[in-house]
Amino acid sequence: MSPLYRKISMVSILILLSGSTWHAFAQVTNATLSGHVEDERGAAIPAAIVTSTNLDKNQTWTVTSDEQGRYSFLYLPAGPYQLKVEQTGFRQLHRAIDSHGRPGAQCAH
């Protein structure tokens, strides 16, 4: 095998490997789900328990709303979600959210 052929082969292998890595990163999809919890008059509800469940993977994440009623879930796998909000003195809220097929989807509620 000539030295030139070896160099061409190594360059080809490196190009193929770097292309594969790029495609692997390109396939990563995630979503950010954020919003605020408020009562029917528009007043913020702090310390509400917000639960997000990925219906495809049956994975659950829970956060607590801040003083302004804001909550945020970062880097969730894209897909259909069931959102549940709970706070003492209020009825539970259930909401279906779908970020399927939208890489980096921002779902605000």
Image (spheres, grey):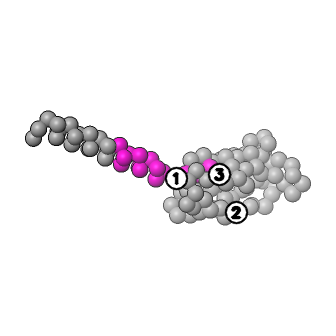
Mark 3 → mark 1, Cα distance in angstroms: 12 Å
Q: Which residues are magenta?
A: 18-32
- Residue 102 makes an appearance in the image: yes
The answer to whether marks 3 and 1 mark residues whose Cβ atoms lie closer than 8 Å is: no
Tell me the kind of residue under disc 2.
Answer: Arg
Indicate left or right for 73 with 11 as reference: right
Dot 1 crowding, Cα within 10 Å, few <14, some 14–19, many 20+: some
Q: Nearer the viewer, residue 17 or 98?
A: 17
Q: Residue furthest left?
A: 1
Disc 2 marks which residue? 95
Label 3 belongs to which residue?
A: 106
At 66% across and 59% down in the image, what residue appears? 83
**Disc 3 packing (10 Å; few <14; some 14–19; many ≥20):** some
Q: Quadrant of the N terminus?
A: top left
Q: Circle 1 is placed at which residue position?
A: 29
84 or 89: nearer the viewer? 84
- Could you say which quadrant of the image residue 94 lies in? bottom right
52 is within the stretch colored magenta = no
Relative to 42, does residue 1 appear above or below in the rendering? above
